[in-house]
Image (cartoon, rainbow, N blue to C red):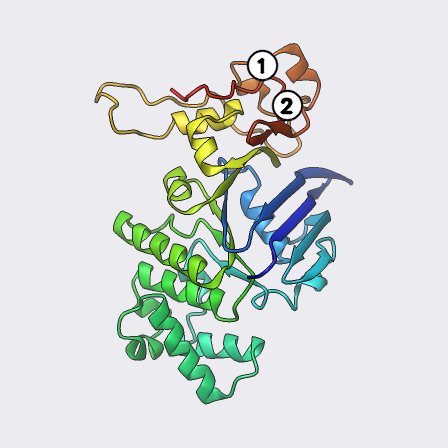
Amino acid sequence: MSAPVELEGLQISLARDGGEVPLVEDVSLRIGAGQVMGLVGESGAGKSLTAAALIGLVASPCRTRAGRLAVAGRELSLADPEALRPLRGRAIGFIPQDPFTSLDPLFTVGDLLTETLRTHLPLTGAAARARALELLSDVGLPSPEVRFEQYPHQLSGGMRQRVAIALAICAGPALIIADECTTALDVSTQAQIVSLLAGLVERDGTSVLLITHDLGVVAELASSVAIMYAGRIVERAPVEQLLRTPRHPYARALLDAVPRVGRTRTAVLPAIPGTMPRPGAVPPGCAFHPRCPRASDRCRADRPPIESAGASEVSCWHPLEDGAARA
């Protein structure tokens, strides 16, 4: 079994007007071997930027200012993107949100896989082809020999996502980052992809960072979850604990906004008032306080640290009571 993956103190900023605007601040995560951590939050929270930092693809005018990553027995600084180059694809696999734009349209599925395999592993051409066909079968792609010769545009969305997963796992990475990998798929295909990822995690003992808006996917696949707001982690907890008794008001609001069986047809789906603050316009104190019904003067003035609160860790001056079931 491989070692857990640890991210500590990630900071990303945007160069603007001669200064730097914080985008991601002090994000720390720990993912056990063979476990899935969900990273959840609204658009603009900083989830995909965090993923980009973990594979060394934060592009100018943004930059990774600080952060330590321990993965596959190595520890390195995320402030040095070049240090991540030999790990990208080998120790860290990445499943993109839209494989149609990430798969090179000029290469067949077989070319994409064999080139990736031979880049990271000492394989001959014949061995790489055999391994590629095995991977296509492992991810449930029908008729692997036929798909091997096809181009990405000849495949359905679900098939392309399976190819993207095969590319992510082909070198046996210790960490897979899945960035909204079910968003563009229909419900039945989403269920198949979730089942596929769960099986791969159980079989290979891989750590997975699952970035998503879909709390249903988190409930199905993840063992722990981190809630992100305005570039910071506001709650970390085992998934069962967070779904049952969230401690941060933002986590509660996200859960309350999920449609549930049992609501009457005329019931109004709760919504979070306001919007995520723009970079450079994050209010002082707790960033969530303009939208929070529990906000006090202390929330408006002082930023709360993240501290243990029962089975959770929460950044809130007025966390919800442990055992208070959500509405």
Image quadrant where one finds the N terminus = bottom right
Looking at this view, is 309 or 314 the one in front?
A: 309
List x then y, in percent, for residue 199: 38, 58
Would you name the residue on which mark 2 appears? 286
Image quadrant where one finds the C terminus = top left
Q: Secondary structure at mark 2?
A: loop
User: Which residue type does callout 1 highlight?
Assistant: Ala
Who comes first in sequence, dot 2 or dot 1?
2
Would you name the residue on which mark 1 appears? 295
User: Which residue type does callout 2 highlight?
Assistant: Cys
Distance Cα–Cα, label 2 vs label 1? 9 Å
Label 1 crowding class (10 Å Cα cut-off): few <14, some 14-19, many 20+?
A: some
Residue 230: in sight, yes or no?
no
How many numbered callouts? 2
List x then y, in percent, for residue 4: 60, 54
List x then y, in percent, for residue 208: 51, 53
